[in-house]
Amino acid sequence: MEKSTLILASGSPRRKQLLTQIGLDFQVVPNSVNENHDLDLPPEAFAEHWGREKAKNVAIDYPDNLVIGADTIVVLDKNILGKPKDKKESFGMLKRLSGRTHEVITGVAIIWKNKEIDITFHSQTYVTFREIPEKYISFYIDNYSPLDKAGSYGIQDWFSVWVEKVDGCYFNVMGLPLSTFYQHYQALVNLHIHL
Amino acid sequence: MEKSTLILASGSPRRKQLLTQIGLDFQVVPNSVNENHDLDLPPEAFAEHWGREKAKNVAIDYPDNLVIGADTIVVLDKNILGKPKDKKESFGMLKRLSGRTHEVITGVAIIWKNKEIDITFHSQTYVTFREIPEKYISFYIDNYSPLDKAGSYGIQDWFSVWVEKVDGCYFNVMGLPLSTFYQHYQALVNLHIHL
């Protein structure tokens, strides 16, 4: 059996960075899924649904590759916070998250269509923010790029100064639960599939 | 009063990366402290002691700068694990840490000699590893650089696949507790010291 290339079905530079960090060879094929955030699902199922949709969307065109899809959401008071639409919504999200603990859930799907491999899982991390004075929220929105991030913050950029505590997988907050992902990946490798 | 440059009294590329991440201007002046790991102190005091020694060592030559020193240690079963001496010690450390939760403590000192600013604090994070098969420990030691790292691992490199969980400040494990550090730093800025 010939070697297959891993495909990351995501345009997120953070996910690309994470897969690179763990030494995997892969190519990026951004998905074209239109995310509808009005789906009535519990947060874990919601994140898994969209992670899977993204993987499926790319797997159709790449049935002989192992395709990874992922969706990251922020949950506060049972509300799902996705990516903010504009600076105003970004400010509102960060104001709500200030001084509190929220949940970050990433749903991940691994699909290899022609081998009938189809795995979906999620990982959950609690993140506690310090109280963030409004001037710093504005500074962040004006100087960084919160609009392409669930919950409107990047844990790996300047915003990290407000992150008091993480409980769970840190990389999950960046967009991919590395340790859980690697366990699934290794299990596939050990099944003698030549990845 | 004129503007002063922040000095990082550490040659660690991780600490440099972290200060850059939070947008601070600084210069690096590595300390020349000889660390003696036989000091009979509780872990927190031990880390603070060496963080302070490093800052003091550089502050002597830079009395008009705010100097940051830091020391990171790993604690397991009340034993302090510093940097491994060689590959054999590295293997032993990772084998001991496998499948268990250990503590990472970073002691930090901020010294501005001519302003009589002298602050020392520490931050504590719990890190849980999955069981790591020996072949992966050997792979890591042969392909990465564990010898310059306390506890013999870098949470931000390939080793991250074995990190099941972090409880506390993630950046503390990399070498500097960003959020706590920034609180102290901002308090100094707010005292109208022109940094």
Image (cartoon, coloured by chain):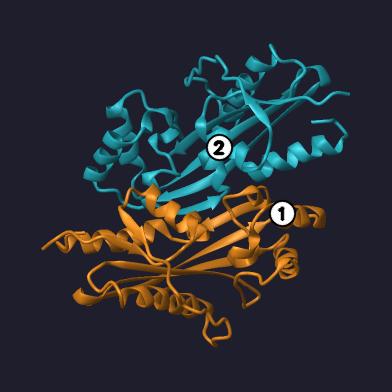
Chain colours: A orange, B cyan
Q: Which amino acid type corresponds to the residue marked 2 in the rendered image?
A: Gln
Q: Residue furthest bottom?
A: A40
Q: Which amino acid type corresponds to the residue marked 1 in the rendered image?
A: Tyr
- Residue identifier under label 1: A140
> In the rendering, which numbered label is found on residue B119?
none
Asked if residue A169 shows in the view, the reply is no
Viewer-closest of A92 and A143: A143
Residue A100 in the figure: left or right of residue B81: right
Label 1: element kind: helix
Residue B126 locus on image (x, y percent): 51, 47
For disc 2, the neighbor class at 10 Å (few under 14, some 14 to 19, many from 20) is few
Viewer-closest of B132 and B142: B142
If the image is split into quadrants, where does the C terminus of chain B sit?
Answer: top right
Height in image: A116 above or below B63? below
The image quarter containing residue B93 is top left
Tell me, yes or no, whether dots 1 and 2 are on the same chain.
no
Label 2: element kind: helix
Letter of the chain that mark 2 sits on in the rendering: B
For disc 1, the neighbor class at 10 Å (few under 14, some 14 to 19, many from 20) is many
Asked if residue A97 shows in the view, the reply is yes
Residue A60 locus on image (x, y percent): 31, 78
- Residue identifier under label 2: B17
